């Protein structure tokens, strides 16, 4: 593990470059201590990285590598992640505060993602298309060349794997710009990738701020595609640059996901799903079920169960035995959460659980916040409309299906949703009516790397994961073979 005196490098090609000028402190949100300092990439570094990536992606050793050989490298990266799982989990934990059990789960998920795309890379074929004349027509899929992957701080292990693995499988070179809050995981995985035989320059890691490093990457003419996961405001800015440059983007953005309980649901199971859906990871998830709609007949019963569960969750140091919630990822982020909860109080909301920092002395130095439940708000309230990205649940009643759909869809977001009901016909109707890229029925937050994922409305553009998640990083080419004998005669 790194110590406070160490300076984390960036990676360009096979060169690990350290520079104190412009370096950032990595802060442990559990106690406010400095983990280490991190080198940040300047405009000049981005220029060097793009040139290195262009040279690497054009080399025969990568351009002409057969799919099953590329798949072997991806498989070895997966093996390396598993071999270093404890170290990787701890790196994520000390940077974003997730409890260690969740970090270990996400490391395993990242390893499985590389394994999945190794299989897709080796087995995915192109198409011979129906001819409309004396020719043979087919589709070929080609890499873009150099692509940018810009990732958030909440789940770097999984988010980075979901971009890097398919982009590599598709034949691209990647510039990874991790969040400045969580840069170490990407660097550690890049080291594993080099050891696994990935040619130098195919994966480059450039820590730094979005304003400097990220901006230089997306504006560089050598970057031919951008994949971004993060906030909607930043995503819109990236889309504007991409539109001017006429390059494709994949944007997985914010959410304010409706979680719905009908009066015929299994209430115990539904409450468990709601608690996991909003408080796991301290609510710092794009798919967090932050708006809970409960049919009025069972509202009091559900609310009582939720309050009991929320008050019983163990908020503790992320590596403490039995910890269920760690700190939020930073002190400024906690201040924003607190300001939104305070706005709920001003707008007539009642805080029925949480709404404050924990009292335990051992947690006083960290950015901890108790699981919070708010009632009494309407759909215009700030806490109901804005993505809080924290452990805050707003509970609202509904009377019937029409009322529910109107409220649930009354948002600019459309990433995820959940429905709890024993009536499969109702589940189908509501699932089809919800404006969201993911609908969970009688479960929540189940995710598969094999199933495409993305949002409606301001929650994003494009779909990651699945076979289409590889095609996202390729462009199709039509090839026609003339079959007229006269045209082939010399």
Image (tube, helix red, strand yellow):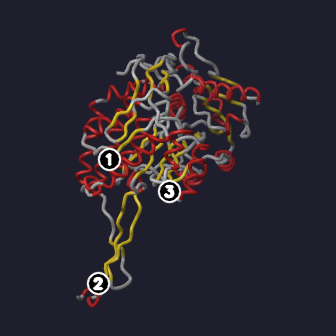
Asked where in the image residue 15 lies, by quadrant, the reply is top left
Q: Which mark is residue 248?
A: 3
- Contact? badges 3 and 2 (CB < 8 Å): no
Q: Where is the N terminus found, in terms of image quarters?
A: top left
Q: Nearer the viewer, residue 87 or 188?
A: 188
Q: Earlier in the sequence, mark 2 or mark 1?
A: 1
Element under label 2? loop
Residue drawn at x 26%, y 56% as measured from the top left: 60
| Residue 83 x/y as whole percent | 26, 31
Residue 413 in percent (x, y) is at 61, 46
**Is 430 drawn above or below residue 303 in the view shown?**
below
Secondary element under disc 3, as helix, strand or loop, is loop
Q: Nearer the viewer, residue 359 or 378?
A: 359
- State the SS at label 1: helix
Q: What residue is disc 2 on? A: 483
Residue on which disc 1 sits? 116
Rendered image: mark on residue 18: none
Relative depth, front residue between 222 and 100: 222
| Residue drawn at the location 28% of the way across and 44% of the way down | 198
- Residue 171 in the image: state x and y as whole percent: 33, 54
**In the orientation shown, which residue stands out farthest toward the bottom?**
486
Quadrant location of the C terminus in the rendered image: bottom left
Q: Is residue 363 visible in this depiction of the protein?
A: yes
Q: Residues within 10 Å of mark 1 (few under 14, many from 20)?
A: many
Tell me the crowding category of disc 2: few under 14, some 14 to 19, or many 20 or more residues within 10 angstroms, Cα based.
few
In the displayed structure image, the side of residue 12 where residue 384 appears, left or right? right
Distance (Cα) linking label 3 and label 2: 35 Å
Identify which residue, 248 or 469, lies in the foreground.
248
Horizontal arrangement in the rendering, residue 72 relative to residue 277 (left or right): left
- Residue drawn at the location 50% of the way across and 49% of the way down: 454
**Is residue 163 placed above or below 184 in the rendered structure?**
below
The reply to whether residue 98 is visible in this rendering is no
């Amino acid at each position: 593990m790194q110590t406070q005196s160490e300076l984390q490098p960036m990676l360009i090609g096979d060169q690990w470059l350290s520079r104190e000028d412009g370096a950032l402190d990595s802060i442990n949100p559990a106690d406010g201590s400095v983990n280490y300092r991190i080198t940040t990439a300047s405009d000049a570094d981005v220029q060097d990285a793009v040139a290195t990536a262009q040279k690497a992606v054009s080399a025969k050793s990568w351009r002409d590598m057969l799919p099953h050989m590329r798949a072997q490298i991806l498989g070895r990266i997966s093996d390396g992640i598993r071999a270093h799982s404890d170290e990787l989990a701890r790196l994520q934990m000390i940077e974003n505060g997730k409890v260690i059990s969740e970090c270990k789960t996400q490391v395993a998920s990242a390893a499985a993602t590389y394994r999945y795309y190794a299989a897709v890379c080796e087995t995915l074929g192109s198409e011979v298309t129906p001819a409309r004349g004396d020719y043979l027509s087919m589709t070929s899929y080609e890499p873009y060349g150099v692509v940018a992957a810009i990732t958030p701080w909440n789940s770097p292990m999984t988010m980075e794997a979901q971009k890097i693995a398919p982009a590599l499988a598709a034949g691209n070179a990647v510039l990874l710009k991790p969040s400045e809050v969580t840069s170490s995981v990407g660097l550690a995985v890049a080291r594993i990738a080099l050891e696994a035989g990935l040619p130098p320059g195919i994966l480059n890691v450039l820590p730094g701020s979005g304003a400097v490093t990220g901006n230089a990457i997306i504006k560089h003419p050598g970057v031919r595609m951008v994949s971004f996961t993060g906030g909607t405001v930043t995503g819109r800015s990236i889309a504007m640059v991409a539109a001017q440059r006429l390059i494709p983007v994949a944007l997985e953005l914010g959410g304010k996901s409706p979680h719905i309980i009908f009066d015929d649901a299994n209430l115990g199971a539904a409450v468990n799903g709601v608690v996991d859906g909003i408080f796991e990871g301290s609510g710092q998830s794009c798919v967090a079920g932050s708006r809970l709609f409960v049919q009025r007949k069972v509202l009091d019963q559900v609310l009582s169960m939720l309050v009991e569960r929320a008050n019983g969750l163990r908020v503790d140091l992320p590596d403490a035995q039995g910890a269920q919630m760690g700190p939020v990822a930073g002190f400024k982020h906690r201040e924003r959460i607190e300001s939104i909860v305070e706005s709920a109080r001003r707008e007539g909301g009642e805080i029925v659980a949480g709404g404050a920092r924990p009292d335990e002395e051992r947690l006083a130095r960290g950015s901890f916040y108790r699981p919070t439940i708010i009632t009494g708000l309407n759909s215009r309230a700030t806490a109901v409309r804005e993505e809080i990205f924290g452990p805050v649940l707003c509970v609202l009643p509904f009377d019937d299906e029409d009322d529910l759909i109107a409220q649930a869809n009354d948002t600019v977001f459309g990433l995820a949703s959940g429905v709890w009901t024993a009536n499969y016909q109702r589940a189908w109707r509501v699932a089809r009516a919800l404006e969201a890229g993911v609908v969970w029925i009688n479960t929540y937050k189940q995710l598969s790397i094999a199933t495409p994922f993305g949002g409606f409305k301001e929650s994003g553009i494009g779909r990651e994961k699945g076979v289409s998640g590889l095609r996202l990083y390729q462009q199709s080419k039509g090839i026609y073979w003339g079959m007229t004998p006269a045209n082939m005669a010399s």
